[in-house]
Image (cartoon, rainbow, N blue to C red):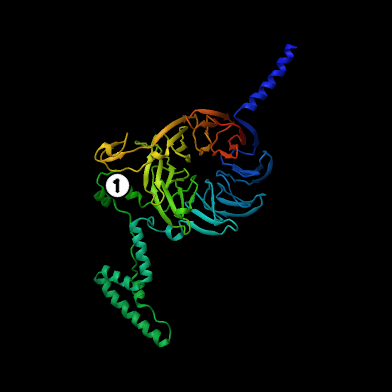
Amino acid sequence: MKRFSVILSAPFLLVTACDSAPITKSWDYRSKAPSVSTPLVLKDRVYFGTEVGLDAINRKGGHVWRVDKQGMDVVGGPTFYKDTVLYGSTNGNFYAVTTKGTPRWEYATAARIKSDPTTHEGNVIFSSYDGHVYNMTIDKGKGNWRFPGATEEDLPGPPTLPVVAEYLKKKADWANEPHWATKMLTQESDQGDAEKINEVTVQCEEAKAQADAAGSAPPDCWRWRMEQLGREPMPPHPPSKKQIDSKCGKDAACRDLESQAWEWPPGDFAYSSPLVVPEENLVVLGNMDWHVYAIDLQSGKLRWRTRLVGHVTSTPVLHNGMIFIGSNGRLGGKKPINGKVYALDVKTGAVVSSYEEITNEVNSSAAIDGDDLYIGDLDGTLHAVDINTFKPSKTCSKADECGEGVACTAGICQSKPVNRWKFQTTGPIRGRPVIYKSLVFIGSGTDDQHMYAIKRSDGTVYWKYRTGGKIESDPVVFEDELFFTSADKKLYAFKIRQTP
């Protein structure tokens, strides 16, 4: 009898323990291949990418359909607009399929696509390792614009660089204002050119007379002279080493800016996903060439770009007129520089402040709620930062001009963003945290493989679950359910029953 009661009590206690757990597993779905793709969760469907394609399952974990093609590795998370699911692949193609998995259209770029696409007013915006950002209509896959366009791509430098902008203006004036062109030519000509001007002018006047006699349209002699002489505004050139030495001396920062300002066209657009800022008419994203780019939403032209330190694979987040984004730093060489989290002015791209308590790259993107910013790094640290402490530097003559606890050093108030707490995992954090009430969820990669629920109040573990592979996707909370993918080929769903 005693033995019988023990056997009965064990399962009873197990069920009770499961029911009382704050977060419980609802189901897991096994796909054909590992996944680092962030799931797209809708009311009755979940879509996510794998190394062999895209899976669609129902909210109970049942298979619905799969797009499975050779070489279709889907790293980025899919997005959704009306009845269309949109996603890119490392095979270089961007796809639009119906919610039933029927192809609508596809578009071939020249390189891998690893970032998440974003939608805005019936259009989809996505980027590629081919160095371009694309804006296309969702219904037919028609291109609205490509950044940079063919004209911009051939420029000697970025069009926002003042000397390049001046060159473009002169070139436009040459095309539209022949009198201005001749004036410029006269100012820049030597004696030999002056003689040729006279010769060409005579030729044009003769051609004019012939046209009059034939009753045809006469040539434009102003433009004729310019074309025959082959004189256009000369494209500007990057400064020489001698010019940089003369301007900057031994100022390393000045030297870097002078040479790097001419880097063009853009490098690879990798994992950083486009952020649409409608109120500023902007699309913002990072690039492997160390820059953050802001593109005009309507025209696809460059509005500003800001150079950070290291590849920018983090996705930008907007908060209170500032763009928050991480950089990877420069970890090699004699003088390694760790990654940082930057706050940029959304209108100008100017660096407002940066958080520097990081000892590795920042591939992760920020999650923001209230006064809190959460972001991970490749050392496996989740950082909680007071977002109100990202403040612009200001000049000072003494410490009391800077405020409590802020030093006046070299005439600058040395204000630094304040860390609230740090939580350490044993694997790299690449995904973006997700905030749910009093918890922040984050997954960890190789050597750790856990999904964590961390208390926002003090940074301690509230709950964790170990999977069979690395977690690089962003966790997603829909209503009171948690979803995430793992390299163990599974998508997981958990019920959040209780929070601290």
- Please name whichever residue, 11 or 178, is drawn nearer the observer in this view of the structure: 11
Which amino acid, by three-letter code, is at mark 1? Cys
- Please name whichever residue, 20 or 25, is drawn nearer the observer in this view of the structure: 20
User: What residue occupies the far top of the structure in this picture?
Assistant: 2
Residue drawn 50% across the image and 47% down it: 273
Q: Is residue 412 left or right of residue 15?
A: left
User: What residue occupies the far right of the structure in this picture?
Assistant: 1
**Is 161 placed above or below 4 here?**
below
**Is 22 placed above or below 82 here?**
above
Residue 83: give x, y in percent of width and height: 63, 52
Q: Is residue 290 left or right of residue 195?
A: right
Q: Which residue is mark 1?
A: 254
- Regarding residue 329, the answer to whether it shows in the image is no
**Is 294 placed above or below 20 here?**
below
Residue 302: give x, y in percent of width and height: 42, 55
Crowding at dot 1, Cα within 10 Å, few <14 / some 14-19 / many 20+, comes out as some
Secondary-structure class at tag 1: helix
Residue drawn 50% across the image and 58% down it: 145
Q: Is residue 137 left or right of residue 224?
A: right
Tell me the quarter of the picture where residue 56 sits: top right
Residue 333: give x, y in percent of width and height: 37, 37
**Is 137 placed above or below 224 here?**
above
- Regarding residue 325, the answer to whether it shows in the image is yes
Residue 137: give x, y in percent of width and height: 56, 57
| Image quarter in which the C terminus is found | top right
State how many labels appear: 1
Residue drawn 61% across the image and 32% down it: 497
Residue drawn 48% across the image and 58% down it: 298
